[in-house]
Image (tube, rainbow, N blue to C red):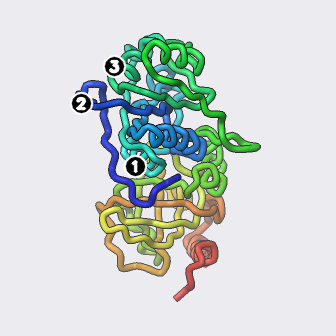
Amino acid sequence: MQTSTPREPRIWRSLAEIPGDLGRTVVVIGNFDGVHLGHQHVIREARAAADAEHLPVVAVTFDPHPMAVLRPEHAPTALTDLATRARLLAAAGVDDVLAVPFDREIAAWSPHEFAERVLGDALHATVVVVGANFRYGARAAGDVASLAASGEQLGFRAIGVPLDGGPQVWSSTYVRTCLAAGDVAGAAEALGRPFAVRGEVVRGDRRGHELGYPTANVPTGGMTAAPADGVYAGWLQRLDTGETYPAAISVGTNPTFEGERDRRVESYVLDRDDLELYDVVVEVAFVERIRGMVRFDGVEALVETMAGDVARAHEILGVARP
């Protein structure tokens, strides 16, 4: 169960950063990208085991994603950065986070070596909880059975949790598939919350301001997930003040204007032209897709369509027009 005001978890970025006086723990392991409902299900099992023994829960994740090291050409786009992932893990019931700095040396550890060095020596695990499909160690040779065998030697109990969801099993891959199709509602169903991107508002060409719809622009990197190009209804939150505003959100390169190639998330706060958001870090949450991206023959057609997008965003978000 998610808590409303979790404390900021400690993030240990190497085994050397783990406090020497760390006592016994319950450990939950996974990439946890997105911290979707399936991840939350596994974490609840770990939290229950920890509460029964009055122990903290430590989440073991990997940074960067193992595929970025082993097969970078097939590495998935990230749904969350490490700091966001840690906050979501804390909201789901985790106390602290170990972000294993994944490299080829660690990739070569045998399953038992991983269990011994990370779970036994570093984290003093009493219980280790993983998803039923968990694989680890060199060539992904380890599974729940080998984890349990190592636990018998190292003093911890291994629990494999059946995958959650249905008929579609929740997974980070499923969330990315939804986003690629512009199905932000499907992504939200799997995540248990709207999908969101974070970033610092940058100065753009101010074309939106000239058209009567000033936008807060957040660039999207090639390795950061974002919904398919199009227009969406959602919410923009300032992370410095916590203020949240309803917004019509455009994702893409704006094909109507020549020369624009940088993909970005542009948020027009409904009915506001007085906000100064440059250099502010914001979170943009997507609620529903309004339409796909279209190239218009002229500015007049674009402005007319934008007016319709704003009206639709009001309806979706339940925000009365002034």
Residue 158 or residue 214, whichever sits in front: 158
Please state which amino acid type lies under the numbered disc 3: Asp
- Mark 3–mark 1 Cα distance, whole angstroms, equals 26 Å
Vertical comparison of 267 with 139: above or below: below
Residue under the point 38% across and 60% down: 282
Identified by mark 2, the residue type is Asp
Q: Are marks 3 and 2 in contact (CB under 8 Å)?
A: no
Q: Secondary structure at mark 2?
A: loop
x and y percentages locating residue 188 in the rendered image: 60, 55
Q: Disc 1 or disc 2, which is closer to the eye?
A: 2
Q: Which mark is residue 87?
A: 1
Total marks placed: 3
Among the two numbered marks 3 and 1 on one chain, the one whose residue lies closer to the N terminus: 1
Q: Residue at 24% of width from left, 30% of height from top?
A: 21
- Residue 36, given in percent of the width and then of the height, sits at 56, 46
| Mark 2 crowd level (few <14, some 14–19, many ≥20, 10 Å Cα) | few
Q: Which residue, given by chain and number where applicable, does mark 2 sit on?
A: 21
Front residue of this view, candidates 118 and 318: 118
Outermost left residue: 20
Circle 3 SS class: helix
Extreme-right residue of the structure: 167
Q: Residue at x 53, y 57 (%)?
A: 251
Considering only order in the chain, which callout, 2 or 1, is on the residue closer to the N terminus? 2
Query: Above or below — where is 307 with respect to 90?
Result: below
Residue position for label 3: 121
| Nearest-to-viewer mark from 3 and 1 | 3
Q: Earlier in the sequence, mark 3 or mark 2?
A: 2
Whether residue 41 is situated above or below residue 107 in the rendered picture: below
- Determine whether label 1 and label 2 are within 8 Å by CB: no
Number of residues whose C-alpha sits closer than 10 Å to that of mark 3, classed few (under 14), some (14–19) or many (20 or more): few
